[in-house]
Image (tube, rainbow, N blue to C red):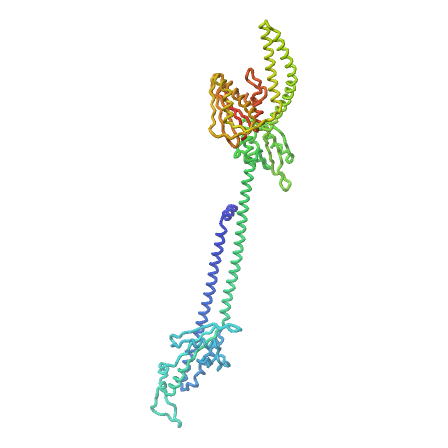
């Protein structure tokens, strides 16, 4: 099951895996960056809200303090900015506050939670930041912020304009009882509203003309720590993603290598199967328990047992072939002993084979016996070739001996023929004796002719080749036997439907071959018939087929037709077909024969162009 899953995973395209890793990287990157900016915005809002709260506290506390002082009869000059200074110092006690300051439009610090920095000027960047503030009412006050980065550290600055002392503020002061006179006496009935006091009003108007801003600087340590943690998380996620991507890349390479290995393995296995199936040797392999694990196609042809029936079975499946089964059973007793023997094998199909059995032991790298390999080689054709070779050797010896005997007989035959002629000339009156002398001369001539044919067959001859146009040649050869064919009632048909190229042959020898084939065909049709000569050109060879409708040749005689001295004719020598085959072979061609009894015979002559 695991192998199947790995194979399914191996079939997935590496680009799909790469796209998945890329999409995962994009998602993680978007989430990481989004979390970073979200935390940064959140921390900024927290610091801004903290600064705004402190500014509101300072503004409210300062106004209430001044309000109480004015109602107590104190002078505005003694209240401003002293009360603001006290409020700033009190507010700076909150954690994370570096300082709070009241700054005028010129950038001079009027009040500061750090007293020693009073009357100093802020930096040009801070002054520009304060100058950009919009003059607005307290209810709709706008708070501005910025991150001030100096050489040592970064601080978070929040600023807003201080509240103005408007008419509503003056009306809330109520009435003021004039103090004692210089003599310590009250001025009876003199109650003047304090807000309408010209001095107070003038002082507040002078104060309102000036523009003040409340500046808060907050420590960004917590802010920076949070951002550092986010950056660290992004770095960790990036490293993890890099490792995942690297692992994915290695996985892709591994999968590609696995796919390549599996593909190569499949090709090797397919090639091995084809090779084993194509071997002209039977291969049967068994494991150490005697079960068949390898069984090729040639073994199936030799034994007649199907492959699907044999695989996985024991060697008892060959019980009808005891020679084969004994070979396997003896391998268990002598595991490492090779064996080679030649036996006659009768397959399940009834066909007999002469085979050579070669048994080998299969040994693994640990020198342990793991099975047996049996090679079965069909020797039937080899045996036939050996038999043909022995037959050819016997015929060659016989031919040499016959040629020697024929050569030695020619001289005595010449003498006998001479004496017969002399005897024939001496006999004048006796008819019977004269006929006897004539028969003696004819028999000597026939014997001499046979000896000449025998010598021609045994003696190698040099061919006199020249260009011959086969179409004209065949028509000329047919014309020579046409009278004999008509006398025997045989119809001769020459079928040449395509252009035949010229061939280089010995015309006289080739004429001897075809005349012999034509005469044999005519003689095979005692009651008439049809002689057909057809020509075809295939694969650079000219094929001439001479067919008749005669008596045919018995199956047991077909293999002997080209043997010297084999004939079925009463007056034949048996050298005609042997001589014809020899001439065609000397031209590099081949003669084959097809025949059926009572249906006719076809002799096929193939000559290279």
User: Quick check: 70 above or below 426?
Assistant: below
Where residue 91 appears, as percent x and y from the top left, is: 46, 77
In the image, residue 258 lies at what x, y percent? 54, 48
Q: Is residue 467 above or below residue 274?
A: above
**Side (left or right) of 466 relative to 162:** right
Q: Camera-side residue: 407 or 591? A: 407
Which of 423 and 324 lies nearest the eye of the viewer?
423
Q: Residue 541: in sight, yes or no?
A: yes
Q: Quadrant of the C terminus?
A: top right
Q: Quadrant of residue 301?
A: top right
Quadrant of residue 431 within the rendered picture: top right
Q: Position of residue 408 (x, y in %)?
A: 66, 17
The answer to whether residue 108 is above or below residue 357 is: below
Numbered label tally:
0
Which residue occupies the extreme left position in the image?
189
**Looking at the image, which residue sits at the far bottom?**
183
Q: Residue at x 39, y 92 (%)?
A: 180
Coordinates of residue 204 in the picture (x, y in percent):
39, 84
Q: Which one is in front, 558 or 506?
A: 506
Residue 599 visible in image: no
Residue at image point 39% right, 80% down = 164
Answer above or below: position of 6 versus 505.
Answer: below
């Amino acid at each position: 099951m695991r192998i199947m899953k790995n194979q399914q995973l191996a079939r997935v395209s590496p680009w799909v895996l790469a796209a998945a890793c890329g999409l995962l990287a994009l998602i993680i990157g978007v989430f990481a960056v989004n979390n970073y900016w979200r935390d940064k915005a959140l921390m900024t809002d927290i610091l801004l809200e903290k600064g705004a709260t402190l500014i509101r506290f300072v503004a409210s506390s300062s106004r209430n303090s001044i309000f109480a002082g004015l109602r107590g009869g104190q002078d505005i000059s003694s209240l401003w900015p002293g009360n603001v200074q006290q409020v700033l110092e009190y507010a700076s006690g909150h954690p994370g506050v570096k300082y709070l300051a009241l700054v005028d439009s010129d950038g001079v610090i009027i009040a500061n939670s750090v007293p020693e920095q009073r009357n100093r000027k802020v930096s040009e960047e801070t002054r520009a930041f304060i100058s950009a503030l919009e003059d607005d009412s307290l209810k709709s006050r706008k708070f501005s912020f910025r991150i001030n980065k100096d050489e040592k550290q970064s601080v978070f600055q929040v600023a807003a304009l201080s509240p103005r002392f408007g008419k509503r503020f003056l009306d809330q002061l109520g009435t003021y009882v004039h103090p004692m006179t210089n003599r310590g006496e009250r001025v009876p009935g003199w109650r003047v509203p304090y807000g309408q006091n010209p001095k107070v009003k003038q002082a507040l108007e002078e104060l309102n003309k000036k523009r003040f801003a409340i500046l808060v600087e907050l420590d960004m340590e917590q802010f920076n720590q949070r951002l550092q943690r986010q950056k660290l998380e992004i770095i960790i996620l990036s490293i993890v993603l890099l490792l995942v991507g690297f692992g994915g890349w290695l996985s892709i390479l591994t999968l590609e290598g696995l796919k390549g290995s599996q593909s190569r393995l499949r090709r090797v296995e397919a090639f091995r199967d084809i090779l084993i199936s194509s071997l002209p040797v039977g291969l049967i392999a068994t494991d150490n328990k005697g079960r068949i694990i390898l069984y090729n196609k040639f073994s199936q042809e030799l034994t007649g047992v199907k492959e699907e029936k044999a695989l996985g079975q024991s060697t008892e499946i060959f019980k009808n072939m005891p020679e084969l089964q004994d070979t396997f059973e003896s391998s268990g007793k002598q595991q490492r002993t090779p064996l080679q023997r030649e036996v006659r094998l009768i397959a399940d199909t009834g066909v007999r084979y002469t085979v050579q059995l070669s048994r080998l032991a299969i040994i693994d790298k640990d020198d342990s016996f793991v099975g047996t390999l049996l090679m079965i080689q069909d020797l039937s054709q080899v045996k036939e070739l050996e038999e043909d070779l022995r037959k050819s050797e016997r015929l060659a010896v016989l031919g040499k001996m016959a040629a020697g005997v024929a050569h030695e007989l020619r001289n005595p035959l010449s003498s006998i023929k001479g004496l017969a002629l002399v005897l024939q000339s001496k006999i004048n009156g006796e008819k019977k004796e004269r006929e006897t002398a004539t028969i003696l001369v004819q028999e000597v001539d026939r014997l001499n002719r046979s000896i000449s044919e025998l010598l021609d067959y045994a003696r190698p001859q040099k061919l006199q080749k020249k260009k011959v146009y086969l179409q004209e040649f065949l028509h000329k050869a047919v014309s020579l036997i046409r009278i004999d064919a008509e006398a025997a009632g045989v119809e001769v048909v020459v079928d040449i439907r395509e252009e035949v190229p010229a061939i280089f042959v010995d015309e006289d020898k080739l004429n001897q071959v075809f005349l012999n084939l034509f005469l044999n065909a005519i003689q095979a049709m005692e009651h008439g018939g049809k002689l057909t000569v057809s020509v075809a050109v295939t694969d650079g060879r000219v094929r001439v087929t001479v067919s008749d409708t005669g008596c045919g040749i018995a199956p047991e005689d077909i293999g002997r037709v080209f043997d010297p001295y084999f004939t079925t004719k009463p007056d034949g020598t048996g050298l005609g077909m042997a001589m014809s085959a020899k001439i065609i072979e000397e031209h590099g061609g081949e003669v084959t024969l097809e025949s059926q009894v009572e249906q006719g015979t076809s002799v096929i002559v193939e000559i290279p162009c």
